[in-house]
Amino acid sequence: MKKIAILGSTGSIGTQSIDVALKHGYQVTALTAYSNAKLLEEQARLLKPQKVALYREEEAAALKTALADTDIKVLYGTHGICECAAETDADTVINAIVGMAGLRPTLAVINAKKQLALANKESLVAGGQLVTNAASENHVPILPVDSEHSAIFQCLQGKPANKALKKIILTASGGPFFGKKKEELDGVTAADALKHPNWSMGAKITIDSATMFNKGLELIEAVWLFGVKPTDVDIVVHRESIVHSMVEYDDNSVIAQLGLPDMRIPIQYALTYPERYPSPVGELDFASVASLTFYKPDYETFRCINICRNAIDQGGLRPAAVNSANEEVNRLFREGKVRFNEIPDLILEGAAAAPVKQNFTVDDIDETDKLVRAAVLDAVSRKD
């Protein structure tokens, strides 16, 4: 029986991972969440893991009391989440934590030499150099869970040994504001931005999709996952979200992975690789789809893509800085404290506070995170 741990089990990817685990009868050895103690308790009683962890100590204390009639160990904080990642019987760990908080758990999984199914793209954005070096040293495979990177991974199966890959083509839905110009977006609200046309995702990633910052993060993630240069990654807007990404080879042949827009497909493939099992998702009906459309991104309106592209070009701590700045600005936008069109400039202003350093540690990333978030808050206070 396959044994898995799920970090971020109460979020969108986490709950869908549980669906896949239940479908195949996998044993879940650990679960973690940020603060949703009620749902985590329900999951723990259903799945009976060895350990659970909440980020916040107060919620963990309440959960410990709630689970006192069980043998489940309740932990808290980053150290508790990392213990769930590394010190259980899991063969594979799904990291579905949202944001920078996923970096240390990613490293904990790798250093424990467990197979990593990675949905936390920020681990590679902020610490790609550290994560890929650790994975190489520990001979740990990183299996992508993001739909786009899973698609690329699948398209690369059977790639010729002569490295005939020409480029990677990431597809983007374009989010809820596709076709809009900058002047049309100044008054949009978080509620408007959360109306994604195709995918059901958490609030943070849905806002990132609306700004297209998410596609910039995926560009950086692709660079680290597949060992390519930033110039080898193209982006194309594909409104139907049926083609999940493509690769082009030296002979100009393009191979694409298609499927319904449901995250359980890439989650399952990461858990069953290299095998393919019957899908928890419906079959793609091409006659119903009827047409597939593709467009160039609007880089003037959606400036966040090139903010990320420039960050990976600069390297060092710059990707971590723009990621942290975006997390803070994203939160402020969801709280109604900044306007949609202010997001790119605030990201750049916050990221400018980061030190310039090419070689860095996890502690350097944490310090950069604090500096950048403070700079964003300062910029917003001065604006007001």
Image (spheres, helix red, strand yellow):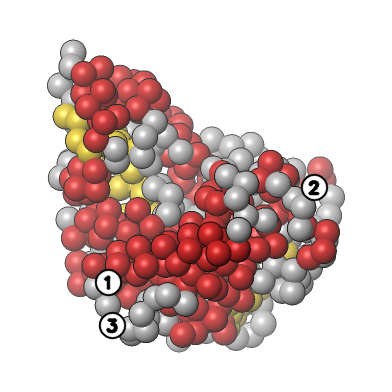
Q: Answer yes or no: is residue 210 visible.
A: yes
Mark 2–mark 1 Cα distance, whole angstroms, equals 48 Å
User: Looking at the picture, does residue 235 appear above or below residue 31?
Assistant: below
Nearer to us of marks 2 and 1 is: 1
Q: Quadrant of residue 81?
A: top left
Residue in front for this viewpoint, 27 or 359: 359
Indicate the position of residue 53 as horizontal and vertical percent values.
25, 36
Residue in front for this viewpoint, 314 or 246: 314
Q: Viewed as shown, does residue 12 lie left or right of 175?
A: left
- Circle 2 residues within 10 Å: few <14, some 14–19, many ≥20: few
User: Looking at the picture, does residue 140 appear above or below residue 310?
Assistant: above
Circle 2 SS class: helix
- The residue under label 2 is which amino acid type? Val
Indicate the position of residue 76 as horizontal and vertical percent values.
22, 38
- Which quarter of the figure is the C terminus placed in? bottom right
Q: Answer yes or no: is residue 84 visible.
A: no
Q: Residue 359 bears which disc, if any?
A: 3
Mark 1–mark 3 Cα distance, whole angstroms, equals 9 Å
Q: Residue at x 61, y 70 (%)?
A: 345
Q: Residue at x 42, y 82 (%)?
A: 315
Q: Residue at x 42, y 54 (%)?
A: 99
Circle 1 SS class: helix
- The residue under label 1 is which amino acid type? Asp
Q: Earlier in the sequence, mark 2 or mark 1?
A: 2
Nearer to us of marks 2 and 3 is: 3
Q: Earlier in the sequence, mark 2 or mark 3?
A: 2
Indicate the position of residue 256 as horizontal and vertical percent values.
63, 64
Which residue lies under the disc numbered 1? 364
Which residue lies under the disc numbered 2? 289
Residue in front for this viewpoint, 17 or 362: 362
